Image: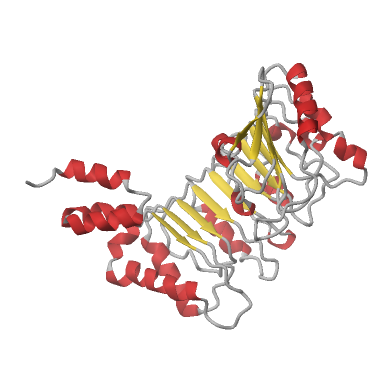
Amino acid sequence: MDIPQEILHAFIKLSQDDPQTLLSLCLVSWRCVDEAQKMLYKTIVITDESDSSSTQVPDVVKISTKLFKTLTQYNPPLAKCVKKFVYHPDFPFRDQEYRDLTNKSLRLMTNLESLTIYTPFPPGLFRGCTFRLNEFLFCCVSSGYPYPDREDMCRFLSRQSHLKTLYINMVDDACITLDRRINLETLCGNRLAIETILPGRSTVKYLEWITGREDDLTSPPRLISNELSNIRALTLGGDKPRPLLALLASHMRSLRVLRLIGKPRTNSSDEADNEFECLPDLVNLRIFVWSARSLGKANCEYEQGMVNRERQRELVTKWFRNMGILEAAYFQIAPVKDEPRNYLCWRRNEIDPVPVGFYEAVSRYTLMPWFWE
């Protein structure tokens, strides 16, 4: 007796995060193939840890070339299944044939919704692409490569009318503009990106200031005090020292969730020690998260000086007394990859903290981990 198609579909949906099971289902019935392919190609992640300075072609380029040829030559309809594409290699598009193949693949991904690129891309990489993204993350962190062509980037972004989330770092000689009719909800980037894109956007509710090496950390971002008052969730920090919270606190009247990463850059140790004193100024704050700052790509080295337990108790006791709607405070106590219970959660009316994982402390509050977790 044949298994009804709706039951096969349910099996496939339950197995969508398990490629091996999906492949096994395809062996059970040919009727599983189409549905399984949609699941298998829904998210494509191309990643590599090889040395980008090497003159040899990395294995990831060879592997991704096979993938792109599948999408462009052997089975083009599969490209329409791709909803999320992540290109992670720290390897620029040096070869013209490889660039053209990547472009052809992207043109066929007409249903693409989320695009993440970790390496500089050449002009024309998105030529002819018709997808409309909800999410674009340009997470280039390699200072040795030139920034993408400004006009090419602006032209690409101008077509993304459905964009809700944008992550982008900018440099002075390649400042990117974005049509104000694009109703962003989440903006992530360095100071220049925030000062360029945030003004005039009342729709942005989630802001992540990922501090860069050149950021001015002594004065508040220019001309965005009204926009800051609309922000409901803020992440401040990154893999570089961040500004003091006091720089922004007076503007954050609607803030409900705050995540601080690492220590602030300051000339006074007293300023750093007393930084948490301004937290009660955030009158609508419900969730506070403190994370350690990663010191390296290996994600196993963190700056010294995590907040010890007694200091945590002292702080949260004062906060719960003075902040009537604060619900919980989370403090990182161990590296993310080394310990599943890497945060302590302090909740109102509970005497002792409870160890929790990264998801509960950060991800569930829509605070994005990005590349340093």
Looking at the picture, how far across and down is residue 351, in whole percent? 69, 21
Does the image show residue 11? Answer: yes
Does the image show residue 178? Answer: no
Looking at the picture, how far across and down is residue 16, in whole percent? 34, 49
**In-front residue for pair 149/347:** 347
Residue at 39%, 69% (x, y): give it: 68
Q: How many labels does the image show?
A: 0
Q: Which residue lies furthest to the bottom in this view?
A: 55
As displayed, is residue 124 above or below residue 83?
below
As displayed, is residue 88 above or below residue 185?
below
Looking at the picture, how far across and down is residue 254, in whole percent? 67, 26
Looking at the picture, how far across and down is residue 275, in whole percent? 83, 35
**In-front residue for pair 196/189:** 189
As displayed, is residue 206 above or below residue 135?
above
Q: In the rendered view, does 244 fall on the left or right side of 78?
A: right
Q: In the rendered view, does 267 fall on the left or right side of 214?
A: right
Q: In the rendered view, does 131 fall on the left or right side of 174?
A: left
The colouring scheme, among rainbow, by chain, secondary structure or one colour, is secondary structure
Residue at 31%, 60% (x, y): give it: 78
**In-front residue for pair 57/188:** 57
Choose top left, top right, bottom left or bottom right for residue 56: bottom right
Residue at 73%, 56% (x, y): give it: 295
